[in-house]
Image (cartoon, coloured by chain):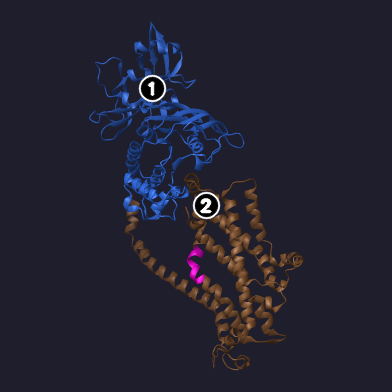
Amino acid sequence: MSATTASRDAPGIYHKAGSLRSERRWALWTAYASLIVAAIIMLAPPVYMFLTSIKTSAEIADLGGNPWIVRSPTLENYRALLSSPMFMGFFWNSVKVTLLVVAVSMVISVLAAFALARMRFWGSQWLATGVFLTYLVPDTLLFIPLYQIVGSLGLLNSTWGLVLVYPTLTVPFCTWIMIGYFASIPKELDEAALIDGANWMQMLVRIFIPVALPGIIAATIFAFTVSWAAFVYPTAFITTPSEMPLTIGVVSQLIRGDTFAWGQLMAGALLAALPPVIVYVFLMDYYIAGLTAGATKG
Amino acid sequence: MAQVSIRKVVKAYEGGVQAVKGIDLEIADHEFVVLVGPSGCGKSTTLRMIAGLEEITSGEIAIGGMVVNDIPPRDRDIAMVFQNYALYPHMSVYDNMAFGLTLRKFPKDEIKRRVENAARILDITPLLDRKPKALSGGQRQRVAMGRAIVRDPKVFLFDEPLSNLDAKLRVQMRTEIKKVHQTVKTTTVYVTHDQVEAMTLADRVVVMNHGVIEQVGPPQELYHSPNTRFVAGFIGSPAMNFIPARMENGSGALRLNLPNGIVLPVPAERTARYGAMAGKEVLFGIRPEHLTEPKNLDRQNIAVFELTPEVIEPMGMETLLHLWMQGHEVCSRIDPTTPAEPGRPMQVAADLNHMHIIDPESGRVL
């Protein structure tokens, strides 16, 4: 006891307490500095894309001068794209495929996850692990057998083929997220619902889906991002421009031979990136809550 | 309202572990029965079998005369209150309480009437619009009870409902539960590991251990005439003292030889009861309140001897002494005004009218 009293009176301790504040200041400085560097690295490409998209072709081709300064800004590239029926066709194809895929994925994965997480049946553990393992098979490996399957169904060169194959990418991961989320819901909640008179479907719709909403939103965002940004499958399965989604439409139609319509390419890519950005901005809080579910729920 | 019959019920898990080993229990209409025992004794499993949340391996359970073995929980007409409340987090208090009735397609005004009535009984009317998140532990427990009351079921099942509350609130809610039962009079099965809760709430207490029922009876009966060493030691706080002793027969009267060379005369009226143990090792059981400072010395069967207190715990209305008797700790309850000092020998009096003799082999109280 006397030893601690003595050391507390020593001047060294007060010095230490003073340094705590300066340590904190240092930590803040370092944090801000690294965040600024990271932000510059992350934001440079989209900013450069944006700058390129508002330049004329002549200005883009001009190698003199600072490429980060736009001398005569123009919205011509955007106007050309938005008035082009082909580009709008790509856009609607993407919207159609994505909405259908998100809907199909969520229905399948919520039902599957509920069954795997809550209805104890023989082999449910193995099945749950199996679902996740299928996610680990890369799509670059899968598109060859899938090509045969889609081909034999006569769905090559059709957006319906994409609606059929995208869920092979989205369902396993969404199911996995939802299993984790459902598993974090206390067991007594379904028992209370069972005693209150709910059947399995009522339990899912009236208890589990509302309670697991953050998880569902996280899974929805994932499915949305995957099917909106899919590249390998449409490249392999679609060759007719009228059936192409944005991702390959922009690339295949705006690069003609070795002529790159850079301004339109960048404008197209930015427009294509817009919907996911909007979705993320609105649902960001839910998304984070969903991904960290297991970590914080007691 | 209904009686509950449990007949030869066994619960065995895969691998042959038996959680409940063939128990029989008849619970009368309006009765408040508490299942009590240490963790793993099978009390919660029994409750969950009544609820239909666990399958019954063999035997049968009947509610209101109808065997419910194969009836799903929702059709058993029971309501259950869980330890962690299990309120639906996305619903208001009103909706939580109304959920069961909504699923059963009750008319809206009937639901409203019942919820408001239950809210009044539980004093939670101002909370009806709140979400569970905005409630304290005690309030959540009330809502969980409200959810049970509105259903007006045949049987209430409580699974350790007070274990998540702090000590003060637990005592308060205990009274609350008893009051509610006196108002609605629904047959109640209540599971707890806390013997004080069991004693204070129950019409009859069921003491379970290792998947079997040790004893069933009203609280006072369990306290004063336990059947087994387990019940004797489990009911009562501080627990009954068990002191190894030797029963000896000396010229027609029985004597108990305790450690420290203490010899206690067995009351004459108990000679016949304990005669068979003469010459054998037994356990002498006595509750702390029957091992006191010398008092009532004019009464019969009071034996006074000397022991040394090691630890003294003043509790306010009483003082607990921990005395050592050759390696055995013995607890005594004395009047707080009695002078006692650790390490100084003092006179203690054992009231042998309340003694128990336990056969150490069978564990039965004789």
- Residue B50 at x, y = what percent? 49, 36
Mark 2 and mark 1: Cα distance apart in space: 50 Å
Is B299 located above or below residue A101 in the figure? above
Q: Which residue is mark 2?
A: A202
Q: Residue at left 65%, top 82%? A: A86
Task: Give coordinates of residue B157: x percent, y percent.
Answer: 44, 39
Instruction: Tell me, yes or no, if residue A291 can be seen here.
Output: no
Residue B122 in view: yes
Asked which secondary structure carries label 1, the reply is loop
Q: In which quadrant of the rendered view does residue A230 lie?
A: bottom right
Front-most of A126 and B309?
A126
- Read off the magenta span: A280-288
Residue displayed at 33% across by 36% down: B182
Where residue A243 appears, as percent x and y from the top left, is 68, 75
Question: On residue B225, which mark appears?
Answer: 1
Kind of residue at disc 1: Ser
Chain A in the picture: what colour? brown
